[in-house]
Amino acid sequence: MALFWKKKESKESLDKGLQKTKTGIFEKLSRAVMGKSKVDDDVLDGIEDALVASDVGVDTTLKIIDMLEDRVARDKYMNTEELRTILKEEMYTLLDVRDASGDEAPVFDFSIKPYVIMVVGVNGVGKTTTIGKLAANLKAAGKKVMLGAADTFRAAAVDQLVVWSERAGVPIVKQQMGADPASVAYDTVKSAVAQDIDVVLIDTAGRLHNKVNLMNELTKIRNVMGKVIPGAPHEVLLVLDGSTGQNAFIQAKEFTKATDVTALAVTKLDGTAKGGVVLGIADQFRIPVKFIGVGEKIEDLQIFDKKAFIDSLFD
């Protein structure tokens, strides 16, 4: 869904942003199949090492290897050229996360107005920047956007969001540092209704040192927004730093315990060879990846396209 940018520019940005991951994976895969005419145990071991090294994760890696072993046993002979096609197909399947009805969730449901997105994630993952880039892209697409600065525990978080609101040209609702985050969220959605806003983006505090408090805080924020707009928030977007590899899995585990996460944004993929984490997290948590960050520019926050992502890794 190329909602905000030209397809050609999006592909170029994606290819460039995934270059380190592509190089890391395929140097190892090339070594695994070098000189081999068919896929054997040595090749499978090499593939396993390559996937684990790119932070696909052990469980997801073993799932891929088991599939390949079954295919080899069934076909008796599989050459290394076939391997590439089969790996692409399996990875695409792992990323194809659907709801109980079998449908793929839309990136945004503009039939709901205002469409409220609560953004969660630990400090430093690019959460506030992701909100700002989303706001700028939505504004460029002709949508009326409002920001809510509910991370009231860090003055820098509010200040950063104010800068993004000015850059994107969208209104922001904020209170003084230390204010009740739920109060900010309540004021934001109330103002959004009054001003006929299309999309509301609520920033929240990124603290994991006390999980009980985190859970209570996020629950309170959800509850107060639901009083103004039944069903809000309509999306809980968890932002993860792709460059942290396995640490991103830990963060996903903690936040899915604390609140009902419905979508993922994986940032900073341009600065790491650990882009395989996108595969592992989508597979292990069965939560759709909706956005990826592959650079510093506003347009480098991309709507996640499963096919384009896998094609970029293999092409």
Image (cartoon, grey):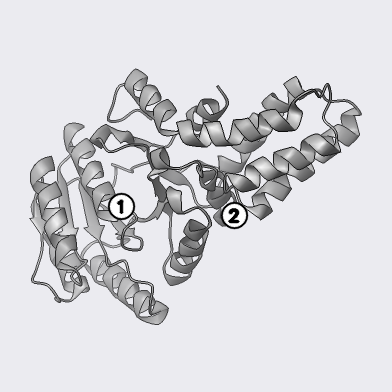
Q: Which mark is residue 126?
A: 1
Q: Where is residue 72 shown, x and y percent of the image?
A: 85, 33
> In the rendered image, which quarter contains the N terminus?
top left
From this viewpoint, is residue 189 visible?
A: no
188 displayed left or right of 246: left
Amino acid type, residue under disc 2 in the picture: Gln
Q: Where is residue 172 shown, x and y percent of the image?
A: 10, 55
Q: Is residue 84 above or below residue 45?
A: above
Q: Is residue 314 above or below residue 157?
A: above
Describe the element under mark 2 as helix, strand or loop: helix
Q: Determine the residue positioned at 55% across, 56% down.
A: 285
Q: Which residue is mark 2?
A: 284
Q: Determine the residue positioned at 45% across, 43% down.
A: 272
Distance Cα–Cα, label 1 vs label 2: 22 Å
Which residue is more in the foreground, 248 or 133? 248
Describe the element under mark 1 as helix, strand or loop: loop
18 displayed left or right of 286: left
From this viewpoint, is residue 82 visible?
A: yes
Please tell me whether mark 1 or mark 2 is closer to you in this view. Answer: 1
Amino acid type, residue under disc 1 in the picture: Gly
Q: Quadrant of residue 232?
A: bottom left
Q: Determine the residue positioned at 49% across, 32% down.
A: 309
Q: Quadrant of residue 107?
A: top left
286 displayed left or right of 50: left
Q: Where is residue 292 shown, x and y percent of the image?
A: 39, 41
Alpha-carbon neighbours of circle 2 within 10 Å: few (<14), some, or many (≥20)?
Answer: some
Q: Which mark is residue 12?
A: none
